Amino acid sequence: MKKALRFVLWSLLALLLTAAVALALIVKIVLAPAKDEWAMQRRIGPLTLDLGVPTLIRLATTPWFAPWLDGRRFDTAHGPVQLHWNEERRQLQVRCAPCQAAVPALGPQPLRLEHLGITVRRDAGRLAGELEAVPPQGTPNGGPLQGRWTGLLTQRDLRVEADLADAPIARWYAVLTPELPELQRAQIGGTAGLKVQFTLPGGAAGPLGVQPRVAQFAVAGLGTEAMLGARTACGPGAGLRADSWLARAVIAAEDQRFFQHPGYDLVELAAAFDKNQHKGGIDRGGSTITQQLAKMLVTGSERTLERKLRELLYAVEMEQTLGKARILQLYLDNAPWGRVCGAEAAARHYFKRPAARLEPAQAVWLASMLHAPGLAAERWAREGTLDPQRLKWVAEGIRGISRAQRAALLRSVDSARYPSPASE
């Protein structure tokens, strides 16, 4: 009897093992990626399987299989993910709570959310759904950001377009930087929305495309009106007017739409975001002169998303409390120029004359340094010149001069050679 029972048990165990191996082989065969298909590796028990991602997505959104996923929970690098199948709407609901994700183009700090919810519906090769991002509990002005997305699924990739609906800008701040100190006292008005295009996997796709929308952005409560009477620590102010050669050259070099924008420039911000993606981090800021002034006087220069969004708040309020003329004057009186700061100190240091009496070519030289003041000063001392392409670009960007004046300026800049103070 014992021998018979032992035989039955061993037979059952052998059948179970055979079934498990057979099931693993079936999974491996069914989900194995085709040639050139988007794939990933996952360990299932003792086996490491290559899985075709498009096949997995189709399987997970198929009505006869998706109910099996209902209630399943997975731990991921972004946070715990819970799945739910809505039979009535024939859609898969994915909820990550709490959730975090790094966006290198925005800086090293990950975005943290109370939860991120995404719904997925599939019709042949097209996917669609809604999304919702909720900031941590207790965040001032907290509330969800919501939107819709569509996706085109192929064997190679998933091309996604998402449209985040217009929402109060204060809510965007709550989602992106919930711990920002200014959120406790700033009154933030206006709305913002965002269109996004990207492709998965990221390496096969091109960069993340963003198209922001901003309307009636206004800020109050940060106290920037006190800067009306601010004094610079860089020495005597230059007292330059906006039509001086140095002021015009600086605008050409740093912010050509200075007199048109409200403190931020969406065109430049989008260009900076695109470049930062290629660099894998923050390489270009896209800052206006107003934002640079906020960085000089208030926020510092740390390369983080939090600092950038603080800078934006102060820049918008400064435009409303100070006006363009005072902003430009403060910028010129505080801007860095290598070993010195402020336009008056720079003009006297490099050219031995007041800023108001600089020759046009001298103004172009100083303005071209602002892109990287320390490196430019070192090059001037080492080579006796600055980057000729940047000098020409700044000269060509100066507005409010005639064609003859521009031609004369370009000739002057091309032939000018000024001794560096370090070589004297």
Image (tube, rainbow, N blue to C red):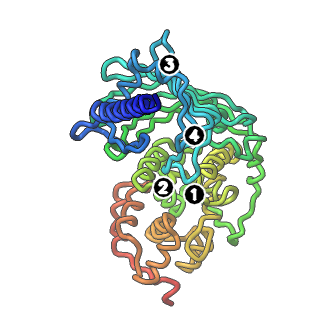
- Work out whether 201 lies above or below 19: below
Task: Mark 1 or mark 4: name the one nearer the start of the chain.
Answer: 4
Q: Which circle, 2 or 4, is nearer the viewer?
A: 4
Task: Mark 4 or mark 3: name the one nearer the start of the chain.
Answer: 4
For mark 2, what is the residue?
A: 281
Residue 161 visible in the picture: no
- In this orientation, which residue lies closer to the viewer: 259 or 111? 111
For mark 3, what is the residue?
A: 85
The quadrant where residue 342 appears: bottom right
**What x and y, as percent, mark residue 348?**
59, 77
Task: Mark 2 or mark 3: name the one nearer the start of the chain.
Answer: 3
Q: Which circle, 1 or 3, is nearer the viewer?
A: 3
Q: Is mark 4 on a helix, strand or loop?
A: strand
Q: Horizontally, is 38 left or right of 222 in the view?
A: left
Q: Which amino acid does label 3 sit on?
A: Trp
Badge 1 crowding class, 10 Å Cα cut-off, few under 14, some 14 to 19, many 20 or more, is some
State yes or no: discs 2 and 4 in contact (Cβ < 8 Å): no
Task: Mark 2 or mark 1: name the one nearer the start of the chain.
Answer: 2
For mark 4, what is the residue?
A: 79
Q: Is mark 1 on a helix, strand or loop?
A: loop
- In this orientation, which residue lies closer to the viewer: 241 or 397? 397
State yes or no: discs 1 and 4 in contact (Cβ < 8 Å): no
